[in-house]
Amino acid sequence: MNLRELAAFLKTRRALVRPADVGLPAGPRRRVPGLRREEVAQLAGLSADYYTELERGRGAQPSAQTLAALARALRLEGDQRDHLFHLAGRRVPAAHGPTAHVQPAMLAMLDRLATTPAMIITDLHETLVQNDLAAALIGRHPMRRGPEASYVYRWFTDPAARALYPPDEHSHHSRVFVSDLRAVAARRGRDAHVVRMVAALRRRSAEFAALWDAHDVALRRADHKRLVHPALGIIEVDCHSLFSEDGRQRLLWFTAPPGSQGAAQLELLSVIGTQDMSLDASHVSLDATEASLSGPDVGADAPTG
């Protein structure tokens, strides 16, 4: 690990990122080129003090998750991300999993969806990054490793993962997830990560095994969803997907037709955000949506698709 070189690299990369590149206002009286230290820390989900210590060449060795978050915050290209890991004495992560490198072009698109729930996932439904509205809609993504980082894996192995969808629609989503996974497996070829996941799911879930043996194939490009929100009840949304050039990453965003109940709920969601709602869902009805939007604020594991 080369703390001095790591510090210098972080400083130079920070100076090259314009606030507009990451969805931040430039603001008046900005005295430094690029981003401020506290802005990088905020984007990476770190404390300002911890990041400052990294730029001073001090502090503990950053974890792989921290380095991945910094690479995203600083919009590093693939070679630059790898260099960051080398300087920190960490093994460069594989192309899959929660520490996979997010393509800067995908992040740029995500930055421009600040008023829409949106997130970036891998083709195995491993959440890489999500905006605040996506967290408010479906929950913060869990920091998992191995197969459990995949929402598809959790869907068939952890009953709690299904709480986002009404029970009468679980069989539909199971079929869609398996059909999508078959398409991904074919596209990746004999990818060891996919082979291990499929083998584990066949052992642990009879439902998955039966669906896999049906050989249905279809990438999940768009879908109409009914999501169960703990405060707002059922929210009907349309889920759209933008695929990266190699197909390994997807930008998902959720919308509802203007004037619909779902649109009103998403607007209310932008007000209440990720607050811990102590009210029963029945107390937050759509009849009160307009009043809630003009009045005071109303005071899980996240799936991916």
Image (cartoon, rainbow, N blue to C red):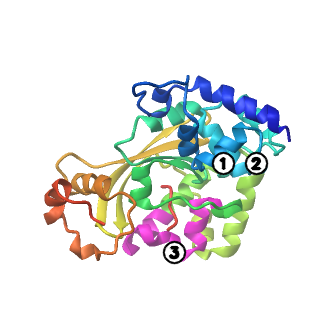
Q: Quadrant of residue 278?
A: bottom left
Q: Does the residue at mark 2 contact the one at mark 3 (Cβ under 8 Å)?
A: no
Res 10 visible: yes
- Residue 148 vs 133, above or below: the answer is below
**Residue 189 drawn in magenta:** no
- Residue 35 vs 138, above or below: the answer is above
Mark 3 and mark 1: span between their CA atoms?
34 Å
Decide if residue 193 is on the left or right side of residue 50: right
What kind of residue is marked 3?
Answer: Ala
Residue at mark 1 = 50
Q: Does the residue at mark 2 contact the one at mark 1 (Cβ under 8 Å)?
A: yes
Q: Secondary structure at mark 1?
A: helix
Front disc: 3 or 1 = 1
Residue 160, disc: 3
Residue at mark 2 = 59
What kind of residue is marked 2?
Answer: Gly
Which residue does the image show at 72% across and 45% down from the upper left? 189
The spot of residue 72 in percent (x, y) is 60, 39
Decide if residue 288 is on the left or right side of residue 72: left
Which residue does the image show at 48% across and 55% down from the upper left? 305
Mark 3 and mark 1 lie on one chain; the one further toward the N terminus is 1
